[in-house]
Amino acid sequence: MVIFYILGLKISHRPIFNLNTIIIWLVFICSYSYASSLNFLYDTKTDKINKRENIFLKYKIDLFKIKKLSGAILITGFVLCFFTASPLYTQIIYITLVISGYLYSYPVFKLSHKAFYKLFLMTLNYCFLPGLLGIIQNFTKYSLYTILTFSLFYSSWLLYTDVKDIKGDKKVGKNTFAVILGLKKLTMLSATISISAVFIVSYLLIINDTKILIILYSAVLVQGALIIKRNWLTNKIYKNIVGYYLLLSFLGITLLIK
């Protein structure tokens, strides 16, 4: 989340290394922690089947303590918004993150069980909203399109988050893209999205910095390699290497943007 916020700052030519960035980072931690606590709470059955680590299962935390913890996290994040450079915008983004986190996990809505909504909310929360907060004070159409495009690019990796959970997700009726498409079609969809995003960056946004394009093309090649080496996605070590490479790619792109 913070990488996309910094990307937004860079695009809009605003300072990065200051107290405001640290406070925003803490606000993001609060929103992410709240969403994670809901996800852990309402996904205990699925996590048990998929053998995922769930702190509420591991430490047997009772419901009352979970609610108190979630409430404290919510309030802390909201209070921190007042100490940022743009409190109103930060509060709006924070509230949006909290609401989408609620919709993602709460049983009545359970949007995490619906493929399109899950991918949309993850892209919105992890990429677009943090980036939007970075550009909001010097907003231009170009900066908006740039954030949208890079969010689209990173969404191609978010498609893979449920690969190792296919078996368990089928049992509980969780319709992720991994369940619906299977590995072969999933990797092809992901590669198509990343190639489309790079095309937009190269030809429509006219970002022609050679270093940035080399990083983007290398990331696309990694995505393409997954079509051939699909077993990497079921291997935790390989999957983490690819995931961290893509994150580092974004960090590199962020630092190179002038």
Image (tube, rainbow, N blue to C red):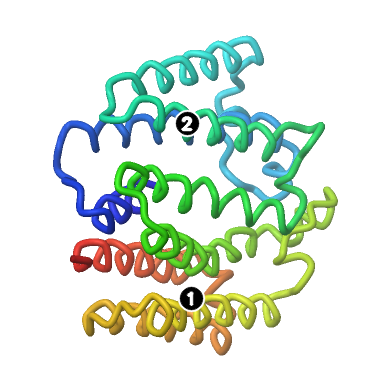
Q: Give me the C-alpha separation between circle 2 and circle 1.
A: 27 Å
Local crowd size for mark 1, using a 10 Å CA cut-off: few (<14), some (14–19), many (≥20) = many
Kindly identify the residue that appears in the image at 33 percent across and 64 percent down. Answer: 250
**Which residue in the protein does label 1 denote?**
197
Residue 161 position, x and y percent, is 58, 59
Kindly identify the residue that appears in the image at 48 percent across and 30 percent down. Answer: 92
Pick the front one: 140 or 153: 140
Res. 227 image quadrant: bottom right
- Kindly identify the amino acid type of the residue bearing the numbered disc 1: Ala
Q: Is residue 51 left or right of residue 35?
A: right
Local crowd size for mark 2, using a 10 Å CA cut-off: few (<14), some (14–19), many (≥20) = many
Residue 119 position, x and y percent, is 63, 56
Mark with earlier residue (2, 1): 2
Mark 2 and mark 1 residues within 8 Å of each other at the beta carbon: no
Q: Is residue 62 left or right of residue 3?
A: right
Q: Is the residue 97 above or below the residue 121 in the image?
A: above
Furthest residue in direction front, as rendered: 140
Residue 213 visible in this rendered orientation of the protein: yes
Q: Is the residue 225 above or below the residue 31 in the image?
A: below
Q: Is residue 128 left or right of residue 103?
A: left
Q: Is residue 244 left or right of residue 192?
A: left
Residue 40 visible in this rendered orientation of the protein: no
- Kindly identify the amino acid type of the residue bearing the numbered disc 2: Tyr
Res. 60 image quadrant: top right
**Which residue in the protein does label 2 denote?**
94
* Secondary element type, mark 2: helix
Pick the front one: 20 or 183: 20
